[in-house]
Structures are given as C-alpha cells and as structure tokens.
C-alpha cells in the first residue's frame, strides 16, 4: 500500500511534466493541424539552457534557491520561446497550405537538426549538475517503507498546477485566448475578422515552447542529468499523452499526461521496468486504433 | 483561371541591411545559450566556458548569408518575371521530359560504373566495402520509396522491417543451419508478414498519426530485441552468422572434407577480396531486382492505385477503391524489400545487434528518400551515395552529416513547395499532354 502510494506520487510528478509538454503538441495541432515533431527537442534545448544557467549561478555563488530557480526559469523560458518562434518561422510557416506530409517531414528534419546542433555545440556526453533541491517530506512512515514526497516533486506539481490555472485563464478569458481559439476554428474567417493569424500562430508556438521550457527546467532539477537525446523519448510520450487526452483539447493534454505518467510508473513498479517504453507505445497504438479522438477530444470530420 | 500576383517593390539597400540585421539579431539570441556558452566537465563538476568569438563569427555569417540569400532570391524572381514577360516559356512538361531523358542516361552510366567498379578496384577493400554500404542504403531507399514515395504513407519505423529481416536470417542460420538462399525468401516473407500485422490495424489512420505509430512500432521492436535476451541475444546481439556461399562454394581458405572452396573450384589463388566482391555483386543484383520489381509494379493496377492514393485519398474512396488493402500492399511490399536488405546486412556483417536498428537509422533512410525526391528512383541513388560518402571525407564531415541532412530535409520541403511531391509525375495519365496541356487546350 505504501509502495503504491509512493508510485502514485512518482507517477503524478512524471505526468505533470508530460502534461506540460503535451500542451505544446496539442495547441499546435489544434491551430495548424500538424504534429510538431521538433517539440521534444525544444524541451531538450531548454534542459540544456537550464544546465548552463544553474552552472553559471553556482559559479556566481548564488545560494538562495528561490532566486536561482526563478532566474533559471526566466532565462530558459526566454531563450526556449525564441527557439520555438524561430522553428515555426523557418521550418513551418513557408509550408502552410502545402500537402500534409511536407510540414511533418520538415519537422522531422528540424528535430534532427536541433539534436545535432546541441550535440555539436554542447557535446555528446551526459551533463550532470549537483542537486538543486535535496530532501523532502515523509508522508507516511511504515516499518517496511517510507512514503516520501521530495521537494523537487512538490515543486513540479505545484508549478504545473499554477501554470495550468494561469493557462486556462489565458485561453478562456483574454483577447489572445479568444484569437487563438478563433484561429483554431477557422483561420480564414479569423483573418477576415481582423485577427492577425500569423502572429497568433507564432505566439502559440512560443507559448508551447515556454511550457516545454518549464518542463525542461523541472527535469533538470528532478533528475540532475541531461543529454542531447532526451527530447526524443519524452517527446513521444508527451505526444502519446496529447493523443490519449484527445489532441486539440487542453484539459485532455493534462489528463493524458497524468495518465501516461501513472501508467508508466506503475508499469515499471509492478510489471517489467525494462518494457515501460513499450507500454507507452502500446497505449499510443491502441488509442489511435480504438478511439482516435482520445478521451476528451472531438471526433474529426474530414470535409471535401 | 486567374493568377494572383504578389507585387513587391524592390528593396532598398537600407531595407536589406535592416532585414539582415534583424535576422542576425535572432541568430544572436538563439546562439547565446548554445554557441556562446557551453558547459564543460572540470574535475567532475561542470563549469561554463564562453565562446563569444565563435558566436560573433556565427552572427556575422548569418548576417552575410541573409543578405546574399535575400539578394539571390530577388534576382531569381526578377529573372523569372522578365522571362514570363518575354513570352511563352517552355512548358513544364517539356522541361520535365528533357530532364527525364538526362536522368535515364545518367542511370545507365551509374549502372555501368556500378558493374565495373569491383573490376577497377579489385584489390581495394575500402572502396568495395563503401560501395556495398551505398548499395544497401539504395536498396533500403527503394524499399521505403514504395511506401513513402508511391503510396504517400510516411513510415518512420522502416528500420523495424530491416531488423526483422536481419534477425530472421541470423536466427534461422545460427539455430537451424539454414543457408542464405533458403533464408532470404522466408525472411522477406516474415518481414512482409510483420508489415501486414502492423499495417492492418493502423492503416485507417491519417498520415501524420500513421507516422507516429510506425515510429512507435520501430521502437517497440528495438526494445524487445534489447530485452528479450534468450531470443535475440539482447544488447550483445548475434555473432558468427554464416556468410552466403557462391552456389555452395564457400569463400574460405580451405574447404571442409568433401567440399570445394570458391578459389579452389575456379583454380584461383585464395583472396579475401573474392568474398567482398561477391557480396558487392550480390547486393547490386538484389538492388537491381528491387528496382525492376518496383518499376514494373508502378505500371500495374496496384501501382497506379498507390499513386492515386497518394494524390487524393478521398477521391480514391469515392471511386470505390479499397484503400486499406491498397495501403496494406504497399506496406507489405516495402517491408519485404526492407527484410531482404536486412538479410543481406546480417550476412555481410556476420554480426548484428539492436544498435544497428535505432530510430536514427530510420531517419537516415527517410532522409535518403526525401532528399532524393519521393518517388524518384535515381534520386535515391544520388542521396544514398552522398549520405554514405560525406562522412568518408573526414571526421568533420562525419560529425556534420546528420546536421546537414536535417537542414536539407527542411530546405527541400521549403524550396519545392509540397516537397518534391509537386515535381513527381504520375506514371500514367489519360491526357498525354498532361494537366498543363489540358488546361491550355481548354483555354483556347
């Protein structure tokens, strides 16, 4: 029981991170109908920025943890959004209105490009940083097993919940959110009514990248190691989360992220740890086969 | 028909500079965290190194590159406008036909060179080995071309079928003593079977979902190969896989009792090159068979159905075509060709491990197909040659290979809107003049 509770906490942490990244996939899919294959690598770039920023802070002898974390978050969000913007501007915008496969192939090219850029400029070795947040809270001390929530796990869950609330408010209440939703429904009509579609799409990419940046910082804090290949697997899992929740739906992405995180940690704990990636891919295949619109998505109607 | 003309005034020098300056500024922002700063391991702890010189050089290069690019694009546009103002240009169809002729001639030259290569380099192990690698990629590219280029299904897990072929041969030969020639068709069939098994449930999905699911499938196969140690040898792979023989004649220094070696049978001195050259011709024949097979298929109803499906799936369904079966056939045939290539790969290396079947390999094969021009057989040869030869020019090139290929994939998609798809001509069409010709006729 205690063990299961611990897995629940681990799964929620993992799920929160997947959810943050999944929102990037789901928003981009909602607005321009493409899978942003490079999104996982945007996340990876942000993890590297976080490592550099943490190392800089350590060199500058900054010991206050809240100060360090907020500095790293701001830096990571700034640069990663710039990457999100640049990727959209160079690789996707020129392809709007072409065939369906073209942007996807372009996105795969972009993903390969980003991965190799990071590998060449930052090195192929794993980058470890000293632990930022140590210790935690013991929730339930049984003789056999102590259920514990670490500070970094708490940080991840609290940050994610805060961001989710802020984000939902932005999409439902602000002028930008209204423009974003209108572009999602009908880009041409939105343009006719005076919405700057290009700007809205750019902002969507930047927002997605900013959330991925937060996830990147959290992963760096949580695991303490990054390498240039982490974007691939995490990207796929987050995408699975987006599909599971119903691609195009924001609450769906969050729900899907949590479910994937939980499934992964319980699978690894009770079944075969070495096959946990197979579980995710299996879920992806099953969802796409049985319920392509996901848990909370609307079925897609193709018009000719 | 009306055409939309985008009028754009010529840029002034100040505007050009401002434009390039803006792009360089973006380059600077992007460059700071990755190029300007880097973390290095100093005695077990990370330390930050600055590389502002490199950053400045990159930003300057971006500035100059943007200026040149903008200027080049403007020049090209002006020339195009001047040409269309001067009178009727040669029609796209005529130009395409001219290009087709050149490609055909080039193809025959390439074939001649491929056949002659081992004769001229009969004692250069390195050249023959590299050429064999090129041919493996050509064959994989042609196999994937059926799926991506002809049927328009983006398969990101093609390497799974390559792995199925390689492991089938490795297991059949090491466990049950099957020879290369016995295992080849069986492994191909197994790979095709996997293709159908995977394809059946997922081919109803739309293009981009399909891509992700195939990617997942490729990874599942790899994870299973790594973890199911009793079956596949795990991360250590399978070693001492028997090499193919020449109609029962081994390429060994000395034959076992009652058998003959290749060198002994033909009265030649033993040389390890014999096997390499034999393997080279073997993959050349396999690749040419693939080419002939695919070219014939393109002219059969099933091939036409693939191309129709690629152009417009909804129209196909409206015409009463069974799209699932058509996709499945493309998937199965692509998988089978990948399986054949896998058998050859296992037989040539003598050792296989899951390392050889990662997503990166799928991406390389896809890059070959995309860069070569989806649906174009000669393009695949060109791209495969480039991809294998670039790293051979030196370590630096090897490092930049995937970077260049990633960038090239993006650029190709941008410069040829709709990918090379728009350039691709259907193999058969009703009106021999083509769409452009028909439109001209109608306008008259």
Image: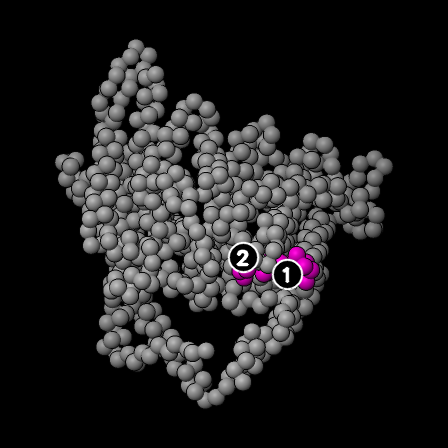
Q: Is residue B266 above or below residue B171?
A: below
Q: Position of residue B313 (x, y in %)?
A: 54, 57
Nearer the observer, A205 or B74:
A205
> Secondary structure beneath disc 2?
helix
Q: Which residue is mark 2?
A: B313
Q: Earlier in the sequence, mark 2 or mark 1?
A: 1
Q: Dot 1, how many residues are within 10 Å of its Cα: few (below 14), some (14-19), or many (20+)?
A: some
Q: Judge depth for marks 2 and 1 and give the one in front.
A: 2
> Secondary structure beneath disc 1?
helix
The furthest residue to the top: A143
Task: Confirm whether the magenta stretch covers residue B77.
Answer: no
User: Residue placed at 83% from the left, 35% from the top?
Assistant: B257
Magenta residues?
B297-315
User: Residue placed at 37% from the left, 78% from the top?
Assistant: B5
Tag 2 subunit: B
Colouring rule applied to residues: one colour
Asked whether residue A239 is in view, the answer is no
The furthest residue to the right: B258
Q: Position of residue B374 (x, y in %)?
A: 55, 61
Nearer the observer, B308 or B397:
B308
* Numbered circles on residues, count: 2
Along the horizontal axis of the image, is B300 left or right of B65?
right
Q: Dot 2, how many residues are within 10 Å of its Cα: few (below 14), some (14-19), or many (20+)?
A: some
Along the horizontal axis of the image, is B257 left or right of A135?
right
Label disc, if present, on residue B181 of the rendered structure: none
Q: Quadrant of residue B148?
A: bottom right
Q: Are marks 2 and 1 in contact (CB under 8 Å)?
A: no
Q: Which residue is mark 1?
A: B304
Measured Cα–Cα span from mark 2 to mark 1: 13 Å
User: Residue placed at 36% from the left, 40% from the top?
Assistant: A296
Q: Quadrant of residue B402?
A: bottom left
The secondary structure that most of the magenta stretch takes on is helix
């Amino acid at each position: 029981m205690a063990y299961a509770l611990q897995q629940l906490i681990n799964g929620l942490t993992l799920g929160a991170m997947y959810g943050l990244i999944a929102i990037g996939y789901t928003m981009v899919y909602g607005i321009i109908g493409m899978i942003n294959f490079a999104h996982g690598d945007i996340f990876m770039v942000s993890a590297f920025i976080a490592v550099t920023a943490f190392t800089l802070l350590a060199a500058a002898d900054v010991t206050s943890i809240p100060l360090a974390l907020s500095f790293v978050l701001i830096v990571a969000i700034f640069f990663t959004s710039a990457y999100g913007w640049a990727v959209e501007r160079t690789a996707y915008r020129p392809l709007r209105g072409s065939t369906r496969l073209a942007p996807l192939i372009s996105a795969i090219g972009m993903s390969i490009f980003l991965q190799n850029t990071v590998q060449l400029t930052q090195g192929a070795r794993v980058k470890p940083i000293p632990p930022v947040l140590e210790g935690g809270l013991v929730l339930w001390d049984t003789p056999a097993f102590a259920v514990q929530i670490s500070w970094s796990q708490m940080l991840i869950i609290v940050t994610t919940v805060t961001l989710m609330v802020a984000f939902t408010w932005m999409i439902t209440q602000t002028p930008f959110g209204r423009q974003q939703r209108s572009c999602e429904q009908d880009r041409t009509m939105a343009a006719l009514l005076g919405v700057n579609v290009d700007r809205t799409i750019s902002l969507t990419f930047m927002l997605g990248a900013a959330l991925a940046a937060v996830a990147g910082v959290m992963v760096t804090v949580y695991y303490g190691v990054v390498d240039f290949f982490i974007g691939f697997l995490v990207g796929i899992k987050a995408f699975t989360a987006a599909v599971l929740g119903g691609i195009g739906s924001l609450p769906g992405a969050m729900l899907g992220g949590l479910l994937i995180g939980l499934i992964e940690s319980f699978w690894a704990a009770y079944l075969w740890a070495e096959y946990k990636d197979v579980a995710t891919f299996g879920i992806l295949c099953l969802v796409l086969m049985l319920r392509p619109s996901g848990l909370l998505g609307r079925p897609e109607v193709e018009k000719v | 028909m009306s055409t939309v003309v985008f009028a754009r005034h010529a840029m002034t020098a100040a505007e050009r500079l401002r434009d390039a300056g803006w792009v360089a500024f973006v380059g600077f922002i992007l460059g700071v965290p990755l190029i300007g700063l880097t973390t290095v391991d100093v005695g077990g702890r990370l330390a930050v190194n600055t590389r502002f010189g490199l950053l400045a050089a990159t930003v300057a290069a971006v500035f100059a590159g943007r200026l040149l690019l903008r200027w080049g694009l403007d020049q090209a546009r002006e020339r195009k406008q001047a040409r269309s103002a001067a009178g009727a240009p040669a029609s796209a169809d005529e130009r395409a036909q001219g290009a087709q002729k050149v490609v055909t001639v080039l193809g025959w030259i390439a074939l001649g060179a491929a056949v002659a290569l081992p004769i001229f380099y009969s004692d250069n192990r390195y050249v023959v080995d590299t050429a064999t690698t090129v041919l493996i990629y050509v064959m994989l590219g042609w196999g994937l071309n059926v799926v991506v280029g002809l049927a328009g299904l983006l398969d990101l897990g093609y390497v799974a079928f390559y792995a199925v072929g390689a492991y089938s041969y490795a297991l059949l030969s090491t466990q049950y003593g099957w020879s290369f020639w016995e295992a080849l068709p069986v492994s191909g069939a197994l790979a095709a079977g996997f293709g159908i098994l995977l394809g059946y449930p997922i081919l109803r999905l739309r293009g981009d979902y399909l891509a992700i699911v195939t990617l997942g499938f490729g990874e599942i196969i790899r994870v299973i190969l790594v973890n199911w140690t009793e079956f596949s040898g795990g991360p250590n792979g399978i070693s001492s896989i028997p090499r193919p023989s020449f109609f029962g004649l081994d390429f060994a220094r000395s034959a076992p009792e009652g058998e003959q070696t290749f060198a002994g049978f033909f009265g030649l001195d033993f040389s390890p090159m014999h096997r390499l050259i034999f393997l080279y011709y073997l993959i050349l024949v396999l690749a040419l068979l693939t080419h002939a097979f695919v070219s014939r298929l393109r002219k059969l109803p099933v091939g036409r159905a693939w191309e129709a499906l690629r152009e417009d799936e909804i129209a196909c369904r409206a015409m009463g075509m069974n799209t699932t079966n058509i996709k499945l056939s493309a998937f199965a045939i692509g998988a089978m060709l990948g399986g054949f290539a896998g058998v050859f790969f296992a037989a040539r290396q003598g050792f296989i491990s899951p390392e050889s079947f990662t997503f990166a390999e799928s991406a390389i094969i896809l890059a070959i197909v995309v860069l070569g021009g989806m649906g174009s057989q000669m393009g695949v040869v060109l791209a495969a040659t480039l991809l294998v030869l670039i790293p051979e020019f030196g370590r630096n090139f090897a490092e930049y290979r995937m970077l260049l290929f990633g960038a090239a994939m993006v650029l190709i998609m941008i410069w040829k809107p709709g990918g090379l798809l728009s350039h691709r001509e259907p193999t058969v069409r009703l009106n021999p003049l083509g769409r452009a010709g028909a439109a001209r006729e109608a306008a008259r």
